[in-house]
Amino acid sequence: MTDYFKGIPAIRFEGPDSTNDFAFHHYNPDEVVMGKRMEDHLRFAVAYWHSFAYQGGDPFGGQTFERSWFGDSMALAKLKADVAFEMFDILNAPFFCFHDADVRPEGKDFAENTRNLEEIVDYFAAKMETSKTKLLWGTANLFTNRRYMAGAATNPDPDIFAFAAATVKTCMDATHKLGGANYVLWGGREGYETLLNTDLKAEADHMARFLHMVVDYKHKIGFSGTILIEPKPQEPSKHQYDYDVATVYGFLRRYGLENEIKVNIEQGHAILAGHSFEHEIATAASLGIFGSIDMNRNDYQSGWDTDQFPNNVPEVAMAYYEILKAGGFTTGGTNFDARIRRQSLDPEDLILSHVGAMDVCARGLKAAAALLEDGSLEAARKARYAGWETPAAQEMLKSGTLDGIAKRVLAEGLNPQPKSGRQERLENLWNRFL
Ligand code: XLS
Ligand code: NI
Ligand code: NI
């Protein structure tokens, strides 16, 4: 036991009337929503990088946090793991997620990185024997080290491609060993700084080869989790190749990967791409590639990817509505890809940020489930398309031709009148459930 969270109790559900800050007011893991326990719906994960590796820096200032586990040694990495698992216990967190670079000290070369990672994976594995917290996903950090400044899989230097591929192999091994439910690839630097030095076609081809190798290796080692790409339009690179869900799908189709890879959709990335979170989830569901979510929010004034904890129930509810409609998570879950603000210095800030976020998500889930169970919204949507259920309409879809249809429109004297989309009525309906 460390004494980092000394005096902070395990967080339990006390209900909406409790005034205890160190309690859940809406997140009740055992409460059944649409036939499933809330914990099994939401599948919350703590992100190792934000809570234990982030030092409080922003583009204008460096470290503000002082943590006893900051530093580059194996002993400190283990202390960090001790604190992490203590926090998972306090939160009753079902999952966590990590990058290799979050959990192990940076070695001088690939061999040392691998040794360090393996040692920490064994340390995690021992802890996971007695902890309830499982691994939602693992990933490789292919963006912080300077070797990746021009990308990983899309780097012009084949040796860097190789270093990245070897690193992903070790991270997939780690994820597999820890029983991870998914493996994530986020291509932070797989984009370009300037077209003047960039070969777009070669970079896309190389990234596709890289992804094929990931898929092949998954099957080779018998990893049964899902491979997920996390779309993001920019930051740190400009115009990343995985801009948004639709772009990722086009890429997967182009290279024959659409049945092997799904998406991990992040709220803040959806906004950066000019979409809403629920739109990205609905798009992925309609394309059959919905996998998991990174829950957070940006600062709406600065417009940056500020990775804040969610605190807007109506927004979160819309997202869970689309997830429930798609049948809920299978291997995926709700990863809090979110960090406390750089002024939030205290151990309790780490805990309370998660407590609040879990409550916000629980409220969103319950509102979404109530609306879905009520059925009025889906009935209205169905009614809007009801014309397509007639045999004539179906026939037109199946074997219609432009000239054939033109003849019929003329013969029948078709003169259709527009109908109301009833948007405000539906918005009012939605609001009754919030
Ligand atoms: C950064 C990404 C990152 C991924 C994992 O913007 O969200 O945190 O989730 O590499
Ligand atoms: Ni992000
Ligand atoms: Ni993310």
Image (cartoon, grey):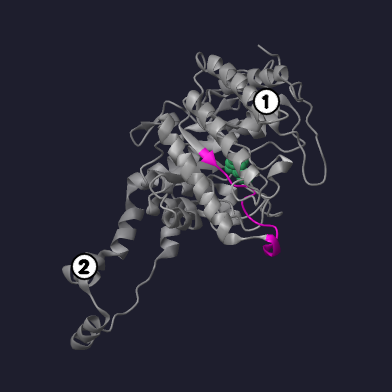
Q: Please provide the residue range marked out in magenta.
A: 184-197
The residue identified by callout 2 is 394
Left or right: 377, with 159 as reference point: left
Note whether residue 272 is visible: yes
Q: Is residue 404 above or below residue 375?
A: below
Residue 9 sits above or below residue 306 on the image: above
Q: Please tell me in which quarter of the rendered image ligand 2 is found.
A: top right
As drawn, is 80 to the left or to the right of 291?
Answer: right
How many residues crowd mark 2 within 10 Å: few (<14), some (14–19), many (20+)? few
Residue 144 percent across, percent down from the top left: 70, 40
Q: 141 and 359: which one is in front?
A: 141
Is 49 colored magenta in this rendering? no
Q: Judge by depth and name the residue closer to the eye, 262 or 316.
A: 262
The numbered mark at residue 112 is: 1
- Most extreme residue toward the top, as rendered? 1
Of all residues, the one furthest to the right in this rendering is: 61
Residue 217 vs residue 270: left or right?
left
Residue 68 sits in quarter: top right
Is residue 149 depicted above or below 341 in this figure? below
Q: Are marks 1 and 2 in contact (CB under 8 Å)?
A: no
Tell me: is circle 1 under 8 Å from ligand 1: no
> Which residue, as the protein is rendered here, is positioned at the far front?
158
Q: Magenta residues: mostly which secondary structure?
A: loop
Q: Position of residue 46 (x, y in %)?
A: 58, 31
Residue 191 lies in the magenta stretch: yes
Which amino acid type corresponds to the residue marked 2 in the rendered image? Answer: Gln
Return the residue nearer the eye: 115 or 409. Answer: 115
Identity of the residue drawn at 76% across and 30% down: 345
**First-in-chain label (1 vs 2):** 1
Where residue 9 appears, as percent x and y from the top left, is 62, 17
